[in-house]
Amino acid sequence: MIKVNTTIKAIKEMVSSLHLKPVTVKLNLGRNKFVTFPAVLSGIYPSLFTVSPDDKNFLGKTAYSYSEILCGRVKIEEREAK
């Protein structure tokens, strides 16, 4: 079993610090498929958070749970504002 160095509480604090800031979202779709897109962290809720993509190819908001970051399916990094 893989030991995790972080907790859901730490992930929630990290996500809440990025609220309404420009971020880069990287999704692991499985079988060596990854999607990366620029977005803004638009909403924070007790069990999930929403992301509004800046890319015109993505329409609407997407929602992810904090456990998806813990598992490695979603990675969020702050990007520099232009």
Image: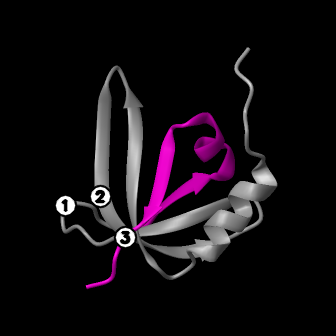
Q: Is residue 70 magenta?
A: yes
Q: Position of residue 42 (x, y in %)?
A: 51, 77
Q: Position of residue 80 (x, y in %)?
A: 34, 76
Three-letter code, disc 2: Phe
**Is 22 above or below relative to 74?**
below
Element carrying mark 1: loop
Along the line of sight, the residue nearer the viewer: 24 or 42? 24
| Visual colour scheme | one colour
Quadrant assignment, res 9: bottom right
Q: Which residue is mark 2?
A: 37
Q: Earlier in the sequence, mark 1 or mark 2?
A: 2
User: Which residue is located at x 40 percent, y 56 percent?
Assistant: 25
Farthest left residue in view:
56
| Image quarter of residue 78 | bottom left
The amino acid at mark 1 is Asn
Label 1 vs label 3: CA separation?
Answer: 19 Å
Start-end of magenta stretch: 60-82
Q: Which of the labelled discs sits on residue 79, or is there none?
A: 3
Marks 1 and 2, how far apart at CA: 10 Å
Which residue is denoted by mark 1 in the rendering?
57
Disc 3 is placed on an element classified as loop
Q: Give the quadrant of the N terminus.
A: top right
Residues at discs 1 and 2 in contact (Cβ within 8 Å): yes
Comparing marks 1 and 3, which lies closer to the viewer?
3
Marks 3 and 2 sit apart, C-alpha to C-alpha, by 11 Å
Task: Give the amino acid type for the residue marked by disc 3 in the picture.
Answer: Arg
Q: Depth check: give the residue in front, 66 or 1.
A: 1
Residue 11 drawn above or below residue 17: above
Q: Is the residue marked by circle 3 packed among few (<14), some (14-19), or many (20+) residues within 10 Å?
A: some
Q: Residues within 10 Å of mark 2 (few under 14, many from 20)?
A: some
Question: Residue shown at 62%/66% (left/top)?
Answer: 15
Q: Are marks 1 and 3 in contact (CB under 8 Å)?
A: no
